[in-house]
Image (cartoon, grey):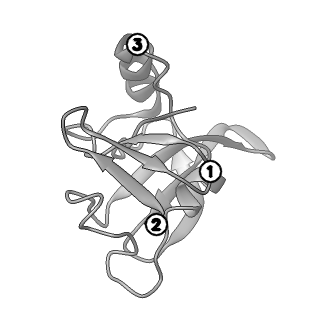
């Protein structure tokens, strides 16, 4: 059985390891953190920003970008917002870069990053 179960009709991917449901495609555009939070608040249906650990769980180090593009076809090497704040500074939130497969704490609320939403 494959780890990822794609539901093309719903545009989602279920991760059988974590039981999380991901949107299969990234949201269009790039957002500041306040814009990202507003976007997610309007998304409904339980969609949210993933934690940095949830994003890290999607990494496939054998590929570049470090994610299975047959499952998540439009993933770029741009940073993606997480919901995980950096403990030493409330104004900084972790981002995740699938180009290298690492989380970065350099993002401020005014930086722009992409969104991949999750629920569960």
Horizontal and vertical percent position of residue 80: 42, 51
What residue is shown at x 50% (from left), y 28% (from top)?
48
Left or right of 16, for residue 10 = left
Q: Disc 3, disc 1: CB below 8 Å? A: no
Q: Quadrant of residue 4?
A: bottom left
* For residue 81, above or below residue 110: below
Give the CA distance from mark 3 to mark 2. Answer: 30 Å
Q: Residues within 10 Å of mark 1 (few under 14, many from 20)?
A: few
Query: Where, by quadrant of the figure, is residue 70 drawn?
Result: bottom left
| 88 displayed left or right of 44 | right
Residue 44, label in figure = 3
**Left/right of residue 89 with respect to residue 100 in the rendered view:** right
Which residue is nearer to you in this view: 60 or 11? Answer: 11
> What residue is shown at x 47% (from left), y 83% (from top)?
61
Along the viewing direction, whichever of 62 and 17 lies nearer the viewer:
17
* Dot 2: element: loop
Residue at 36% x, 17% y: name it: 43
Q: For the point 60% across and 51% down, which residue is it?
A: 54
The residue labelled by disc 2 is 1
Mark 2 nearby-residue class (10 Å; few <14, some 14–19, many ≥20): few
Where is residue 95 shown, x and y percent of the image?
52, 53
Lower position in the chain sequence, tag 1 or tag 2: 2
What is the distance, in whole Å, between disc 1 and disc 2 at their CAs?
A: 14 Å
Say which element carries label 3: loop
Q: Residue furthest right?
A: 88
Categorize mark 3 by other alpha carbons within 10 Å: few (<14), some (14-19), many (20+).
Answer: few
Please give the count of numbered marks on the rendered protein.
3
**Residue 98 drawn above or below residue 91:** below
Q: Earlier in the sequence, mark 3 or mark 2?
A: 2
Q: Determine which residue is flagged by label 1.
A: 18
């Amino acid at each position: 059985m494959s780890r990822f179960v794609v539901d093309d009709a719903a545009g989602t991917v279920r991760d059988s390891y974590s039981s999380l449901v991901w949107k299969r495609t990234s949201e269009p555009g790039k957002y500041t953190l306040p814009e990202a939070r507003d976007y997610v608040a309007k998304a409904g249906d339980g969609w949210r920003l993933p934690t940095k650990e949830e994003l890290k769980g999607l990494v496939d180090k054998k590929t570049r970008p470090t994610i299975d593009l047959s499952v998540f076809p439009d993933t770029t090497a741009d940073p993606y917002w997480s919901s995980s704040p950096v403990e030493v500074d409330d104004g900084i939130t972790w981002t995740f870069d699938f180009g290298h497969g690492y989380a970065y704490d350099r993002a401020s609320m005014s930086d722009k990053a992409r969104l991949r939403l999750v629920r569960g």
